[in-house]
Amino acid sequence: MDLALHSDESPVHLKDIARRQQISLPYLEHLVTPLVSGEIIRSTRGAHGGISLLKPPEKIRLNEVIRLLEGSIAPVECVNDPDICPRAGSCAACDIWRELKRAMNRVLETTTLQELVERQRQKEASRNGEMLGSEGAVRPEQPKDA
């Protein structure tokens, strides 16, 4: 998301993303590798290097990103592979886990990176408005006692 927020600053340095997102650089480097392999982002080496999106954020669905970073989002293994559990066909809990996976997939398949960016911008604007309202509000001058 940070990359999409700063897409006008192409390419973006990993250390800048790590600082803004308050995550370690080694962890971020670990996340970048599958995103490069999955052709979501490109990595450019050199003094003016960094990472950039390969396609516009409105063309990137969150399920693509999650699949590359996490694999399946099934909450338990029997959802993906019912053969590992002899009770999978008769287990009511497994039914719930399947429904949960379908619901999460629907959200991720229908949400783009651009929509996530817009939500983040709204939250930041709201937070900044609250901060201004509580701390930065200009108050009318009070009459001075003579």
Image (cartoon, rainbow, N blue to C red):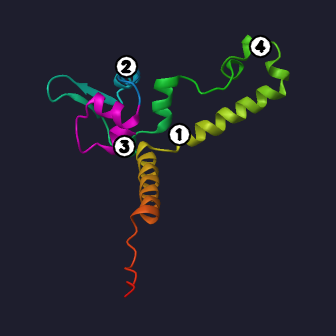
Residue 31: x, y in percent? 41, 23
Segment tinted magenta in the rendering: 1-22
Mark 2 vs 1, N-terminal side: 2
- According to the picture, the residue beneath numbered tag 1 turns out to be 109
Q: Quadrant of residue 83?
A: top right
Q: CA distance from mark 2 to mark 3?
A: 24 Å
* Quarter that holds the C terminus: bottom left
Mark 3 vs 1, N-terminal side: 3
Given residues 112 and 132, the one toward you in this image is 132
Which of discs 2 and 1 lies nearer the camera? The answer is 2
Q: CA distance from mark 2 to mark 1?
A: 29 Å
Q: Is residue 8 above or below residue 94?
A: below
Mark 4 vs 3, N-terminal side: 3
Q: How many C-alpha atoms fall within 10 Å of the one at disc 2: few (<14), some, or many (≥20)? A: few
Image point 77% across, 26% down: which residue?
94
Given residues 72 and 5, the one toward you in this image is 5
- According to the picture, the residue beneath numbered tag 3 turns out to be 57
Image point 39% across, 79% down: which residue?
140
Residue 64: x, y in percent? 46, 32
Three-letter code, disc 1? Glu
Mark 2 vs 3, N-terminal side: 2
Q: CA distance from mark 1 to mark 4?
A: 28 Å
State yes or no: residue 34 in magenta.
no
Three-letter code, disc 4? Cys
Q: CA distance from mark 2 to mark 4?
A: 37 Å
Which of discs 3 and 1 lies nearer the camera? The answer is 3
Residue 85: assigned label: 4
Say whether residue 109 is left or right of residue 113.
right
Residue 26: assigned label: 2
Three-letter code, disc 2? Pro
